[in-house]
Amino acid sequence: MRALTWQGRRDVRVETVPDPRIEKPDDVIVRITSTGICGSDLHLYELFGPYLDPGDILGHEPMGIVEEVGPQVHALQAGDRVVIPFNISCRDCFMCNQGLHSQCETTQVKERGTGAAQFGYTKLYGQVPGGQAELLRVPFGNKLPIKVPEGPPDDRYVYLSDVLPTAWQSVEYAAVPPDGTVTVLGLGPIGDMATRIARHRGAGLIIGVDLVDERLERAAARGVVCLDLRRHGKDLTEAVQELTDGRGTDAVIDAVGMEAHGAPLAKAAQWVTGLLPGAVAQPLMEHAGVDRLGALHTAIDLVRRGGTVSVSGVYGGAADPMPLMTMFDKQIQVRMGQANVWRWVEDILPLLTDEDPLGVDTFKTHAMPLEDGPKAYAMFQAKEDGMVKALLNP
Ligand SMILES: NC(=O)c1ccc[n+]([C@@H]2O[C@H](COP(=O)([O-])OP(=O)(O)OC[C@H]3O[C@@H](n4cnc5c(N)ncnc54)[C@H](O)[C@@H]3O)[C@@H](O)[C@H]2O)c1
Ligand SMILES: [Zn+2]
Ligand SMILES: [Zn+2]
């Protein structure tokens, strides 16, 4: 089959690789029809080289048609239409039973001390072949795939794999009071969808922050009060306070993560990939730790006293110093983690209708064949051509 593989920093290629096969009796093989590129994939593209091998298949936002089922699969049959959650969760263990699917105890990557395995997401998460490919082997065939109706286009359902549950969880964790205020940092797919879900769930004032024209415009068109980081770099806190009686918003959602604008990205990347000699790398490492937390520090500044910070953006790397004193003094609550996809499926599915309250049918900005994957990665990272969300169609 054809699959998008990681080869090195900013180097992904579509190659011919062996087809996946049923390995366990409850595996299924899915023929992928649509598969998203996520901001999390950009971290692999730029920073996470040490945790990948050339040839690793990326992708964790797939949907498609069941092609083959193992002998113990009774919940699905060939031809069924399914969305595959990015966390590989058994839905049957202590953690899964509490709705903590990203901590699944059956798939935790114990040798690395991390949570549930994920499709296409490095050795830290099990080095499991991902879904930017023609075919995907999916374990827990009776439990993991989300069966969706025939009829509507893939756009209607594909975001159940990641964008929708992640954005839903970010809003849930933000605990915005009814008619309350929330700032969303980052208006990529996750932040954008978080503003929509916050609106749907009754938030009042929603402030969005980004520095890319198309992303700011897209959120503003849906009633988000947008602040352009290029204009409010220094006085962002004042700008938010002005809109909130001097307090800050009840909640802040960080939908940026460790590659925040302003961080010394190239240098950090060189350090992570070990290209710099130790004497140069060590002081850099200390700063990279601080600076890469840019968006999180902003969130702590912007939230009102006693408010909640909800972190969806992915952070990784060295022990990062945090402004603990301010966090304590402001009495804020911080909630974070990988989305527990299955936890939110029943909340979200009823919204995926022809009325389309969240605008999923028009959410993507680009659809491209799998063969154009490398181009799509480069465009998404550079935020070219107004790309906010790209789907690949194998
Ligand atoms: N927790 C989860 O389960 C989960 C799931 C999916 C994605 N993520 C993470 O969520 C984050 C966003 O993902 P995405 O797909 O929307 O990616 P993205 O990279 O397209 O979005 C990030 C946005 O933040 C903006 N930005 C950069 N620096 C900023 C700053 N200092 N202040 C405000 N905005 C800034 C960028 O312009 C961009 O629009 C990533 O870190 C991704 O890894 C987490
Ligand atoms: Zn993702
Ligand atoms: Zn489990």
Image (cartoon, rainbow, N blue to C red):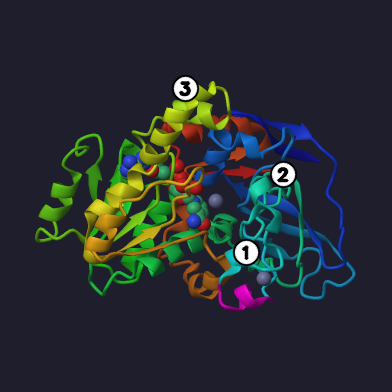
Quadrant assignment, res 48: top right
Of callouts 1 and 2, which one flags the residue occurring earlier in the amino acid sequence? 2
Q: Is residue 224 visible?
A: no
Q: Residues within 10 Å of mark 3 (few under 14, many from 20)?
A: few
Residue type at tag 3: Val
Height in image: 239 above or below 163? Answer: above
**Magenta stretch?**
92-99
365 or 229, nearer to the observer: 229
Q: In which quadrant is the C terminus drawn?
A: top right
62 or 53, nearer to the observer: 53
Height in image: 91 above or below 54? Answer: below
Q: Residue at x 52, y 29 (%)?
A: 271
Which residue has dot 3 on it? 280
Position in image of residue 286 (x %, y %): 42, 35
Residue type at tag 1: Gly
Q: Residue at x 66, y 52 (%)?
A: 112
Q: Is residue 293 visible?
A: yes
Position in image of residue 15 (x %, y %): 76, 32
Of callouts 2 and 3, which one flags the residue occurring earlier in the amino acid sequence? 2
104 sits left or right of 47 in the view: right
